[in-house]
Amino acid sequence: MKRLDGKVALISGTARGQGRAAALRFAAEGALVVGGDLLHEQAIETQHLIAREGGTALTPGPLDVTDEQSVSSWVEEAVDAFGGIDIVYANAGAVRFGPVDSRPYQDFAFTMRAELDSVWLTVRSAWPHLRRSHGCILTVGSTAGLTGSLTNRRTAHSASKGAVIALTRQLAAEGAPHGIRANCISPGLIDTAGSRTNLLSDDHPMRAIARHIPLGRVGGPDDVVNAAVFLASDEAAYITGANLVVDGGWSAVLPGTSP
């Protein structure tokens, strides 16, 4: 039996990167995947990839996780198609980096809305269905929500991800009486098409960060998805309110010179 057999999983941000990897892996583990993204055509490509591998997926339409009506419609279409919701994986987000003294308030507000409000809106819409299924919630934090950075100017990102971690703990508290589990996954630097255009670009101070990661490499989407599958499965039935850090040991050590 597959680890997520027959479970209905809402996964936002399935057009690329960690969201696409999650959709493919959850489907391979037997989940009925409902994906969504503003990049709708690319999310449809993800759906086709799942179908090609024999999985089941639905991508109702363009999804704007910062828009209440868009999120509500997405959730209801999932319920109409599959009868309920077992897993909510609030993966989608967007960020604008920059020093605190040179970024406009609009950039801060954009990041908070895309990375924090989006989680709350998704969970709020799915909550009645999660109560019926005694389901689970997966959120995406970051090591940015745990520590500051000397190389990456990210006040909005740090604030939003710290808040996601705190929100997840509160969701675990409020969900427990209804059998709802809520856990957060906090990746370190992950190699995706998006990160290669900024944090891992040749001209960014973090380009050589792998030298300072104890396990000696930058993470990949599958490193994050492996943790997500575990937390969504019955193997994690006694885990809620946790923040699982997936960063190769980066946030666990003090900075220093390479050996």
Image (cartoon, rainbow, N blue to C red):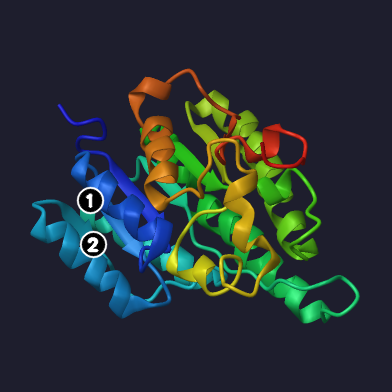
**174 or 7: nearer the viewer:** 7
Q: Is residue 50 left or right of residue 64?
A: left
What is the residue that sits farthest to the front in this orientation? Answer: 259
- Seen at 91% across and 75% down, the residue is 101
Q: Quadrant of the N terminus?
A: top left
Looking at the rendered structure, the secondary structure element under dot 2 is strand
User: In the rendered image, which residue does mark 2 sit on?
Assistant: 58
Count all numbered tags in the image, as a single digit.
2
Q: CA distance from mark 2 to mark 1?
A: 10 Å
Q: Earlier in the sequence, mark 2 or mark 1?
A: 2
Q: Is residue 109 above or below residue 182?
A: below
Quarter of the C terminus within the rendering: top right
Q: Residue at x 38, y 55 (%)?
A: 11
Tell me the kind of residue under disc 1: Phe
Q: Amino acid at mark 2?
A: Leu
| Dots 2, 1 in contact, CB < 8 A | yes
- Circle 1 sits on which residue? 82
